[in-house]
Amino acid sequence: MTLFLVICQGIGLALSAGIRPYLPALVAGAAASAGLFYADFDGTDFGFLDGSWFLLAVVLVLIGVVVLERRIGEEELERGPYGAALAGIAIGVGALLFAGSLAGEDYTPWPGLAAGVACAALSQAAVRSLFRRTRTRLDTAAKDALPLYANGLALVLAALSILAPPVSLVALAFITWLLLSGRRREGQKYAGLRILGRDE
């Protein structure tokens, strides 16, 4: 039973990191410092996850991202080298949090690295696709609020993953559905555009 709950926690933390990695990393670090549930990295190779230097680095990166979002906009931030770097950070943090969850309960951590990469990449793709579609229907003020929603969603999911780990399975199913339905809609859109192009 413990392994099941730890895996659920790892799934949830990795999914939340894929959405936005900063607050989930801080939540997991704070929970580990307090010894809450299965978030305990002490005595493992992942003990740095609740270390002050790591959490400070996360805060500094978060501040930098917020400044960049205000300066160039979230949509522009997702493109080019900035977007690639932030995507890599999110996936890397998701992998570390999943592996750290396993290591904290004396399980082999390397499967968590692979599973964490997969979960973080999944949620990242689903949320980016959703926001890309949503932006086209929003005014400027609403678009500017999207990062707040993303951070709030990541924060809530990370907290629930620690407090009620099985909730992560519901999140995993929903995010998978969100990605698949989004791709289906985009496929239908492009198919419609091709038909219109032929008609012309």
Image (cartoon, rainbow, N blue to C red):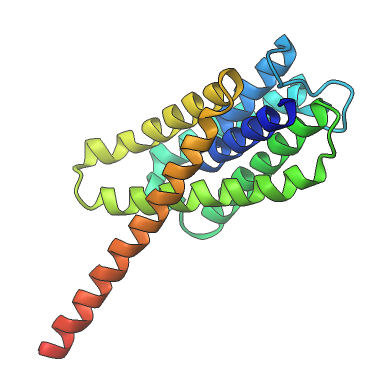
Asked if residue 83 lies left or right of residue 194, the reply is: right
Residue 110: x and y in percent read: 81, 45
Q: How many marks?
A: 0
Outermost residue to the left: 200
Judge whether 144 appears above or below 120 on screen.
Answer: above
Identified at 34% across, 57% down, the residue is: 182
Please name the residue shown 55% across and 27% down the image: 158
Up-down relation of residue 159 to residue 110 (above or below): above
Quarter of the image containing the N terminus? top right
Which quarter of the figure has residue 112? top right
At horizontal 62% and vertical 51% (from top left) the residue drawn is 118
Which residue is at the front of the view, 193 or 105? 105
Q: Is residue 48 left or right of 80 when viewed as pictured?
A: right
Q: Where's the C terminus, which quadrant?
A: bottom left
Q: Please provide percent x and percent y for residue 95.
A: 69, 43
Q: Nearer the viewer, residue 35 or 82?
A: 35
Q: In this rendering, would 32 be left or right of 188?
A: right
Q: Is residue 199 above or below residue 192?
A: below
| Residue 183 horizontal side relative to residue 192, left or right | right
Which residue appears at 75% of the width and 38% of the height?
A: 99
Q: Position of residue 109 (x, y in %)?
A: 81, 40
Q: Measuring from the top left, give residue 189's x and y in whole percent.
A: 24, 69
- Give the residue at the far top of this rendering: 34
